[in-house]
Image (spheres, rainbow, N blue to C red):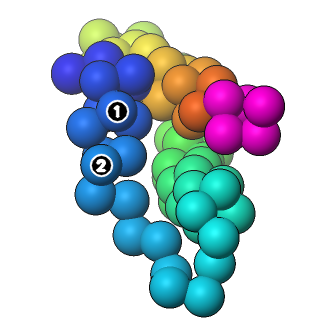
Amino acid sequence: MEGKALVDKVDERAPIFNNLPPITGALNWTTGLLERITEPMERLTILSQSIKDREEYKDVQKLYNSLCKNLKEYNDQKIL
């Protein structure tokens, strides 16, 4: 599933705290998601070159980049 489809699918069930306005809650949610996916990806980037050459790594990297791009676009959409 591509990044945009994942963001759109999960957006409907986004856990937003009751004490936050909808836009702030959505921004808080996407920021948390970005933080949660960034740390493991940073760990993967320090692995050996033989792992980076594998097709699975390239797929993960492509999905990560797509998710980051779509989450940032989602944030921009909520702000504007």
Residue count near mark 1 (Cα–Cα under 10 Å), binned few <14, some 14–19, many ≥20:
some
Who's the residue at 65% across and 70% down the image? 21
Between 64 and 27, the one nearer to me in the picture? 27
Viewer-nearest residue: 54 or 65: 65
Residue 67 lies left or right of residue 73; in this view the side is: left
Q: Which residue is mark 2?
A: 12
Magenta-drawn segment: 75-80
Q: Secondary structure of the magenta portion, mostly?
A: helix
**Does the magenta-highlighted stretch encompass residue 77?**
yes
Secondary structure, mark 1, is: helix
Instruction: Determine whether 64 is above or below 26 in the image.
Output: above
| Residue located farthest toward the right when viewing the structure as drawn | 80
Q: Is residue 40 above or below residue 55?
A: below
- Residue 76 in the image, given as x and y percentages of width and height: 73, 31
Q: Give residue 43's position: percent from left, percent from top.
A: 57, 50
Residue 8 bears which disc, if any?
1
Q: Residue at x 28, y 57 (%)?
A: 13
- Residue 39 is a magenta residue: no
Asked if residue 31 can be seen in this view, the reply is: no
Q: What's the amino acid at mark 1?
A: Asp
Residue visible at 63% across and 78% down in the picture: 20
Label 1, label 2: how far apart the Cα atoms are: 7 Å
Q: Is disc 1 in contact with disc 2, using a CB cutoff of under 8 Å?
A: yes
Tally of numbered tags:
2
Crowd rating for badge 2 (residues with CA inside 10 Å; few <14, some 14–19, many 20+)? few
